[in-house]
Image (spheres, helix red, strand yellow):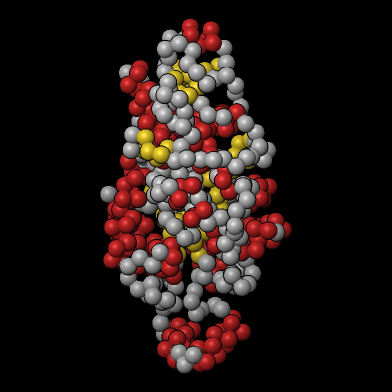
Amino acid sequence: MILIYTHKITNRLKYIFKIIFNALIDSEIKFTTNKDEFNSYNGVKFSYTNRPIADELFFACSSILFETGLEIKDIECFTFEDMPAFFKVSNSSVLRFDPFAASFYLVSRYEEYLPFIKDTHDRFEAKDSLAYKNNFLDKPVVNIWAEKIRSIINIRFGDVIESKKKFNYIPTIDIDNAFAYKNKGYIRTIGAILRALFKNDFADISKRLKVILNLEKDPYDTYNLQIELHKKYKLKPIYFILFGEYGTNDKNISPQNIEYRKLIKSLSDYTDIGIHPSYNSCKNIKTLKAEIDKLSELLNRDITKSRQHFLKMMFPETYRRLIELDIKHDYTMGYASEFGFRASICSEFNFYDIDFEYETPLIIHPFAFMDSTLKNYKKININNVIDILGPLISEVKKVNGTLISIWHNESLGKKDNWDGWDNVYEEILRIATE
């Protein structure tokens, strides 16, 4: 048990210390505001306050964990002992910055509550984040800071905190469009053929007809390959199913389609299934509820996992709607345009609602990279992907975190210039599990 003296115990303080000590360092803690109790305690202890009590292990605090509400922070980032740092504190502190306040700022997504310019999908962009602007988006700095805190305590008290966490890898698959040509219905199929005719794309027409006539396999039907790869590397993926009606940004098969329903049920035999809420459902809780209910009814089980389509997320409304509909786990935390760590952490954590100042039951699972980020946003050459992702994977392994990736069924096929990305995916699985 680690005893921590502080001058005030707040929800923010309890929340971030729970993440760092219970989730990352794997140690039990207790707070006290009583100096006599602290001074008489003979076990592992430190103070987190404005100034040291005596000669104890002392972490100087900044103000954010003792505040309520939001205000624009003038944050200056710097490097301390090869670590990104901010919220500078006095020289009497064992660290020259406040890792607890900085962790809360990043994990709570404090900056996303503040005014910002939205992108075309109403999203907070990576380029506007503190991590991107200060070149630490590719590092899980909260985990790194936690390891530093563990080291400081062990040096002072003699290796009292062992590292029990192990690296974990969770591949996830989004099914935005289950099939390229099959099961689209007469109207969509005829419309696609007419568009191809207008473009003189006779190869697409030929391919489409061969697939429809069962002369060739649909190029997005890569499900057997997925199952083989995940079994080969002893991985259990999570699938997120787009189960809304057809729309401008929702191109999947109709939820009523028999073949599509069979596919989902067959996938559920060997993996977990979550909802991939349709594009507009993030603003309409009735639509979201209907999609969750339909998927739940099909699988005859509760749906407790989700990832937003287009990674379309608004703080804190999106998470509040998920909580209201009994979603327990969300996997949206990441950026479409950049790889790295949106919340600067590579471990699961509970969502903290700053407006109401409390820790919610919704568990957030941050992802590190997505196939379309690499190919479409960053336009990385297929031969360079592993060189770029290798260091990212290593960062997670060094802190015994959880690596989560996003792939799509179509990116394992050969349509739309995805040829060869199936090999990239297997190489990622190999590196992550070796």
Q: Nearer the viewer, residue 194 or 37?
A: 37
How far across and how far down the image is residue 116, in percent?
60, 53
Q: Is residue 133 above or below residue 290?
A: above
Q: Quadrant of residue 84?
A: top left
How far across and how far down the image is residue 166, in percent?
36, 38
Q: Is residue 360 above or below residue 260?
A: above
Q: Nearer the viewer, residue 28 or 235?
A: 28
Q: Quadrant of residue 65?
A: top right
How far across and how far down the image is residue 134, in percent?
43, 47
At 28% from the left edge and 66% from the top edge, which residue is drawn? 383
How far across and how far down the image is residue 257, in percent?
59, 72
Q: Is residue 340 above or below residue 354?
A: below
Tally of numbered discs: 0
At 53% from the left edge and 7% from the top edge, which residue is drawn? 36
At 49% from the left edge and 12% from the top edge, which residue is drawn? 53
> Residue most toward the right?
286
At 54% from the left edge and 85% from the top edge, which residue is drawn? 192
